[in-house]
Amino acid sequence: MEVCTLKKNKEFNFVYRRGKSAGSRDMTLVYAKSRYGGARVGFSVSKKVGNSVTRNRARRRLKEAYRMIMPEISGHHSFVFVARSSITAADFQSICHQMRRLLEKMGVLPSAGRKQA
């Protein structure tokens, strides 16, 4: 299954303006109801985070974590994951765990402790 990404500046701005946010140690999630079908996602890593190699590595790790969680996501939402500078020291399992917790907090993933009907 292919990841639908936000590409244009106006798509990112729509999420930032209309969205709600939640944060963890290494990333912030901003999400809004999507104007399009399915879930769409964008990844943002500021120039404050290391050099270009470090930023691209952080972006690739975020994309892979999202790709692994994506089949469980329900609803039509647009997400933007914003990496914080501490993400460079985080291991991949920690990134996946934080991403899952943020998505559960927003209600787009079933909670780990909650039983499915």
Image (tube, rainbow, N blue to C red):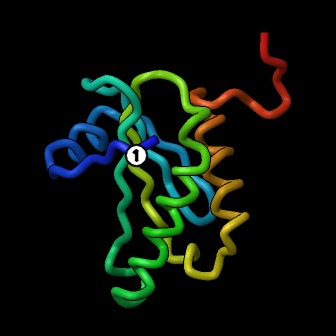
x, y percent for residue 100: 65, 46
x, y percent for residue 23: 56, 52
Quadrant housing residue 73 = top right
Q: Relative to 110, is 69 on the left or the right?
A: left
x, y percent for residue 71: 57, 36
Residue wearing tag 1: 3
- As helix, strand or loop, the secondary structure at mark 1 comes to loop
95 or 1: nearer the eye?
1
**Count of labels in the image:** 1
Tell me the amino acid under the disc marked 1: Val
Q: Residues within 10 Å of mark 1 (few under 14, many from 20)?
A: some
5 or 54: nearer the eye?
5
Instruction: Name the image quarter holding the C terminus.
Output: top right
**Residue depicted at 43% across the width and 68% down the height:** 59
Is 76 rendered above or below residue 39?
above
**Residue depicted at 29% across the width and 32% down the height:** 18
Is 79 rendered above or below residue 54?
above
Is 45 rendered above or below residue 37?
below
Question: Furthest-top residue in view?
Answer: 117
**Residue depicted at 14% across the width and 44% down the height:** 10
x, y percent for residue 48: 37, 81
Quadrant housing residue 88 = bottom right
Is 27 rendered above or below residue 47?
above
Question: Furthest-front residue in view?
Answer: 1
**Residue depicted at 42% across the width and 37% down the height:** 31
